[in-house]
Image (spheres, rainbow, N blue to C red):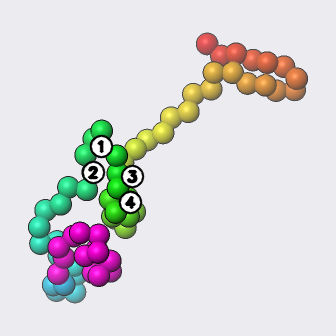
């Protein structure tokens, strides 16, 4: 895993049977699109940075149109 994180631009070292990040890194900033490398880092650390909401405005069911207000 250390080689993978280094390829993604993180400065990591092995210490006491764990990986240690040696320099601070900002992975994402609000309003800026993610690069593929940033997305890979977020996946590795299982970080979710967005919530999706779906609102239903209308439906078609059994041949009938329904509009929700």
Estimate how packed mark 4 is, as few (under 14), some (14 to 19) or many (20 or more) residues with alpha carbons within 10 Å: few
Number of marks in picture? 4
Of labels 1 and 3, earlier in sequence is 1
For the residue labelled by badge 2, is the local secondary structure a helix, a strand or a loop?
loop
Q: Is 36 positioned to the left or the right of 60 in the image? A: left
Image spot of residue 25 (x, y percent): 18, 60
**For discs 2 and 4, the disc positioned in front in the rendered view:** 4
Estimate how packed mark 1 is, as few (under 14), some (14 to 19) or many (20 or more) residues with alpha carbons within 10 Å: few
For the residue labelled by badge 4, is the local secondary structure a helix, a strand or a loop?
helix
- Magenta part of the chain: 1-13
- The answer to if 6 sits in the magenta stretch is yes
Q: Are marks 2 and 1 in contact (CB under 8 Å)?
A: yes
Residue furthest to the top: 69
At 39% from the left edge and 52% from the top edge, which residue is drawn?
Answer: 48
Distance of mark 2 from mark 4, alpha carbons?
Answer: 11 Å
Most foreground residue, 19 or 38: 38
**For discs 4 and 3, the disc positioned in front in the rendered view:** 4
Residue 22's image quarter? bottom left
For the residue labelled by badge 1, is the local secondary structure a helix, a strand or a loop?
loop
Residue 42's image quarter? bottom left
For the residue labelled by badge 3, is the local secondary structure a helix, a strand or a loop?
loop
Q: Which mark, by number, is residue 32? A: 1
Q: Are marks 3 and 2 in contact (CB under 8 Å)?
A: no
Q: Which residue is mark 4?
A: 36
């Amino acid at each position: 895993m250390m080689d993978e994180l280094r390829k993604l631009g993180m400065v990591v070292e092995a210490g006491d049977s764990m990986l240690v990040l040696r320099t601070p890194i900002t992975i994402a900033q609000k309003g800026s699109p993610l690069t593929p490398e940033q997305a890979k880092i977020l996946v590795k650390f299982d970080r979710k940075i967005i919530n999706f909401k779906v609102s239903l405005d209308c439906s078609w069911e059994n041949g009938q149109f329904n509009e929700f207000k």
